[in-house]
Amino acid sequence: MNYYIDLFSPETAKAFTNSNQEVSGYRISRKTYVENKKIGIGDKFICYCTRIQRFIGLLEVKSNYFIDNKPIFAANDDPFILRFKVKAAVWLPLEKSIPIHNDFIWNNLSFTKNLGKKSNQWTYMVFSSPRLWPKEDCIFLEKLLLEQKDKQLDYPFNDEDEQKLKPSKIKLSNKKEVSITIPDDKDEKIETINEDVSGEQRESIKIQASLAAIGEKLNFKIWIPRSDRNRVLEIWKPKENSLLDELPLVFDNTTVKTIQNIDILWIKRRSIVRAFEVEDTTSIYSGILRMADLLSLQPMLDIKIHIVAPLARRDAVFKQTTRPIFAVMEKGPLAEFCSYISYDSINELAKEKRLGHMTDTILDEYTEFAEEET
């Protein structure tokens, strides 16, 4: 028996509360992970509510996974169709859910106890679900959740929590509601860089090189913009014919100009399979715009697109991908197609020794969407 984190947003937590509480669901992109971990009967889900950062429940898994698109967590086009039958051993009202920043919890979890309360270095533990969690941490949380089920202590919301419980939404013409974010001015700040100060490679160039190397091992051809190519090739030494000198694509000039400036492309024959924008100290918005331009120019293309950035910029990525302008694209809301991957995840994947025997679906285990949580 293993424990896994199960992420809910405040909205999907309320949807689960109003359901018969017998099904938990995930995005179909988690299917490979679920199969690899053999998640099934007897495992347990520790339930965590994002945005307000609280533990809200404990679910016992009562079935193997199944696919079902009956609306549970969204009124229309429910994205969480990879599902398990569950039994709610504990399910708390949001106002009685336990904050992770509670001293007793914070000082006892293996991944927070040595951090200051303002640190976000622990948030990699809640970037996707289901995800295997340390057993000792989960046994500790299970005991606390069972106690809270009986005690029903109040953990009042502060002003910041109250704001997080009221996300902005817009209704599209097909009656689908989409969450949006209007970033503050401080979110728009573009940090300046000086690449010549120390002579060291920018971290973003190292990540580009890692993405190129990973793609090569997965048997893709690699495209790197000419402006970055020399710096990336100081780190990555491609095999013969791995790096493309010209894009083998048949598009109009406008589309080609957009595509050729994307930081990394993985290409199979004449098709782009995955596209990556690597963001470090430059504006996240510029990379996201390129991705949006690509989907707008070629809405029928089936490309997986990713923004790769340091963990500290994760929230900034989501704030930008959920802007109102990106919610009304012809292909659909950008946040549903454009995922986030942390630098740490790319570095971890690059160490995988079996990449040559894998497919690119391994990357889906490291991706996170703005509305990932069930």
Image (cartoon, grey):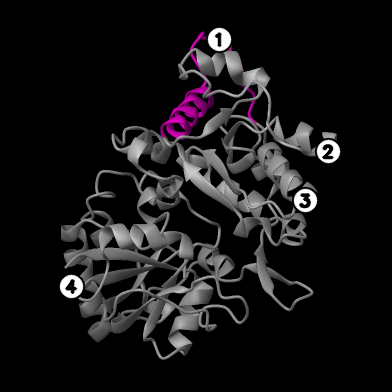
Residue mark closest to the camera, 4 vs 3 = 3
Task: Specify few, some or many for label 1: CA neighbours under 10 Å numbering under 14, 14-19, or 20 or more.
Answer: few
Which residue is disc 3 drawn over?
Answer: 296
Q: Looking at the picture, how far across and down is residue 93, in whole percent?
A: 40, 82
Which residue is disc 4 drawn over?
Answer: 143
Q: Could you give the CA–CA distance between mark 2 and mark 3, rounded to whole angstroms?
A: 13 Å
- The mark nearer the N terminus, 2 or 4, is 4
Q: Quadrant of residue 173?
A: bottom right
Q: Could you give the CA–CA distance between mark 4 and mark 3, rounded to whole angstroms?
A: 50 Å
Please say whether residue 170 is visible from this viewpoint. Answer: yes
Q: Could you give the CA–CA distance between mark 1 and mark 2, rounded to whole angstroms?
A: 40 Å
For the point 29% across and 70% down, the residue is 45
Task: Tell me the element at label 2.
Answer: loop
- The mark nearer the N terminus, 2 or 3, is 2
Three-letter amino acid code of the residue under disc 1: Val
Q: Could you give the CA–CA distance between mark 2 and mark 4, rounded to whole angstroms?
A: 60 Å
Three-letter amino acid code of the residue under disc 4: Lys
- The mark nearer the N terminus, 1 or 2, is 1
Task: Specify few, some or many for label 4: CA neighbours under 10 Å numbering under 14, 14-19, or 20 or more.
Answer: few
Q: Looking at the picture, how far across and down is residue 342, in whole percent?
A: 46, 41
Segment tinted magenta in the rendering? 191-217
Three-letter amino acid code of the residue under disc 2: Asp
Q: Which mark is residue 252?
A: 2
Marks 2 and 4 close (CB-CB < 8 Å): no
Q: Which mark is residue 197?
A: 1
- The mark nearer the N terminus, 4 or 3, is 4
